[in-house]
Amino acid sequence: MSENDAISRISGIKMPDYYLNYYSNLSKDTYTIFEHAALAKSSLVDSSGIIEPKIAFDLADRVAKMHDIDIAEPLRELLKINGKELTALIISKEIALGKYSLTDATLEQKLDLAVRVGLAIVTEGVTIAPLQGISEVKIKKNKDNSEYLSVSIAGPMRSAGGTESAVTILIADHVRKAVGLSKYQANCFDDETGRFVEELRIYEREASSFQFHILDEDIEHVISNLPVELDGVDTDPFEVVNHKGMTRIKTDRVRGGALRVLNDGLIGRSKKLLKRIELYKLDGWEWLGDLKGAVQTGDNQEDAAAKRM
């Protein structure tokens, strides 16, 4: 986007002249600084010859440039009509079906991009979560050879916040349905629900605290019903004791990013998620309403029941 493009976008907005002059000067000075930086970088004295930051005008620009995908205009139009989350679902589905992807991209690559772009829209393109919070999105097989979608979460997902990180799983399920993949079948190889219970308690005790305290039965209920696999990379040097060497979980260490999505997102924000699920008419998530709920950490036990989320 050039300086003239930036100025032309605000010229049609009704505002006092001094506002227009302010934003015009801001745009002009920004591009002047950018040109000086480009000139300095061209000397190759620095380790990189390019300017890493990109100039973006709005949310649509940020998301498009973050993922190097040409969706700024359609995204901008959708955002005028729909909210961020509904727009994220629409765009992610289109990407999964190949509308904006490279012609030679595999289905797995399309799904990976779809989930990342969806999360970027929800987080307004201002966090690192879409790039580094999602480690990978893979197509895997259940024991009966049916294919399902797996989302591997890394530590930087924390920057997205609890609700948004959980919405990532909703987006993943949405694109899974769009391309016709089967549901994830928990425990078809090993005791994966038990692994999550043990892992979360070890993480809670040895590594870090969560925003909410949740019940073991809620952990088991969520993992048993998730239509996509919640996986993750190891984040801390603490290992499980009773659930090592599992078929689909490649590490014996705790996976902090995945645990935080489970604890503070899917369970801790389950009521918020249910409202979104109902609003956007997403089926297959009714079981979230059966959770006992989460208690904010630090509450007195006497008040805990009254403060369940």
Image (tube, grey):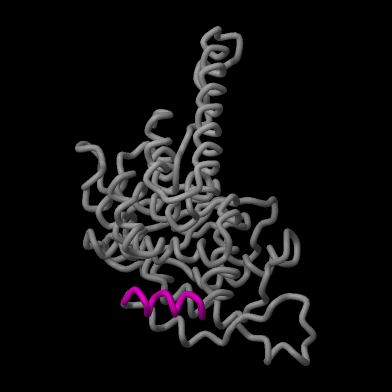
First to last magenta residue range = 271-281
Task: Give the residue furthest to the front.
Answer: 17
Q: Position of residue 37 (x, y in %)?
A: 56, 18
- The verdict on residue 209 being magenta is no
- Seen at 21% across and 47% down, the residue is 99
Q: Position of residue 162 (x, y in %)?
A: 57, 65
Which quadrant of the rendered structure holds the C terminus? bottom right
Closer to the camera, 302 or 7?
A: 7
- Seen at 32% across and 51% down, the residue is 75
Residue 206 appears in the picture as rendered = yes
- The verdict on residue 275 being magenta is yes
Q: Position of residue 66 (x, y in %)?
A: 44, 40
Q: Is residue 143 above or below residue 289?
A: above
Instruction: Give the quarter of the image for residue 90.
Output: bottom left
Closer to the camera, 84 or 228?
A: 84
Which quadrant of the rendered structure holds the N terminus? top left
- Seen at 46% across and 67% down, the residue is 190
